Image: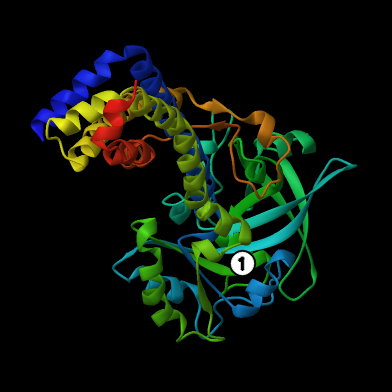
Amino acid sequence: MAYLIKMAWRNLGRHRGRTILSLIAIITGVFVVVIAKGVIDGIVDTFITYNINLNSGHIRVIQPEYKLKEQTLSLGYAVGNEDTPYHSIVEDIRSIPDVKAATGRIRFGMLLLAGDDVQETVLTIGTDFDEEEKIAHLSRFLEGSQAGTLPRVGQREILLGDVLMDKLGIGVGDKVNAVFSTSFGSLGIATFRVAGKMSSGLKFLDESTAYIPLDTAMHLLDMDDSVTEIVVFGETLSKAHALTTEVESVAHTLPGTPIVVPWDEYSELISLMSKAKAIYAVIYILIVTLASFVVFNTLLMIVSERTREIGMLAALGLTPQSIQRLFLMEGTILALIGSFIGTLLGGVFNLWFGSVGLDISMMTENLGGEFLLTPRIYPTTSWAMLIFSYALGVAVTIVAVYIPARRAGKLKPTEALRTI
């Protein structure tokens, strides 16, 4: 085997132009895969992370009817009542060893009024800000000394996005009136002080969402012992489905028999995005396959040009299998070196882009609020991604050179030696 490797290495040096061209093709293919995978993974991971933190949690505990009417922001299907209050439910869930955080949220619609003619309809979320900080870290969106603070427990204070505040013409510390429907369907009116201004880059937060303290929302909506949903977080996303079974043991004892919904069943969009990495894996394979055609054609040409030489090797006692392995060795050396350089260059490029970010504001401007993407995406770089790209480049290139190598091994010595 050692002598075949030496021969393969020597043969690659005989036609440096073709060798360099093949290397460039492999390097380019793997380089593009690393960059594309870094960008796609960055977009998908950002979207999923924001959706989990702001919407679905790792799992949600909700009433079955609420899942059907969630888009209407119905308050009629709550978790918890006077006999089994929300606070006791969430404490039972938090006592589960694998639960990192659990908190209730009340989602409802609200009309904000500022001045005489300015009004905006918003999704309002009543939440426990202390528990929410373990999850969504809303305080990180309060940028600058004029951004204010998170609303305080028991206070009629509200957290709004910067774009929404500009539309309303208000600032931190100003008052804003709100009109909403209670859980009984009656009209509710309240005045809030703007405690903080969010600048997240997300349309969902900056343009159409308001946060108020959970206890304040309960009081205003006549939901003193209940919430519309309980979001639960485990240690890692990979353990979410295992956590579902543990939380179900608590949920099945509750009034109305609430259901436990994993994060990837929150919506069709998040389900599709969670499968995007697998879908794009096919594209990565196609990219490397296209690049490997250069190696395929080059090696096929080399086999044709070295027909007489192959005949000489066979006449000297080299078996067809050894001749085939010789050409496979040449392709493997190209695959190993080209894939390594392509992976290295792509990894360095992604590390740089991961620090400065990639501006996709032109794309996000036309997206709706349900697409939780910021105007700047940071491509990811991980050992798993680099190993995947390297292995893909090597595997596809070796497969591509198999046919020329097999053809070389099948040449008969007498016919090969007659070739001029």
- Residue at image point 22% right, 35% down: 323
- Residue at image point 42% right, 35% down: 380
Left or right position of 147 against 177: left
Q: In the depicted view, which residue is nearer to us: 297 or 363?
A: 297
Q: In the depicted view, which residue is nearer to us: 27 or 158?
A: 27
Q: In the depicted view, which residue is nearer to us: 194 or 2?
A: 2
**Regarding mark 1 in the picture, which secondary structure is present there?**
helix
Q: Residue furthest right?
A: 117
Q: Position of residue 6 (x, y in %)?
A: 14, 24
Residue receiving disc 1: 218
Q: In the depicted view, which residue is nearer to us: 378 or 259?
A: 378
Left or right position of 126 against 19: right
The quarter of the image holding the C terminus is: top left
| Total number of numbered discs in the rendering | 1
Is residue 387 visible in the rendered image? The answer is no
The amino acid at mark 1 is: Met
Is residue 142 visible in the rendered image? The answer is yes
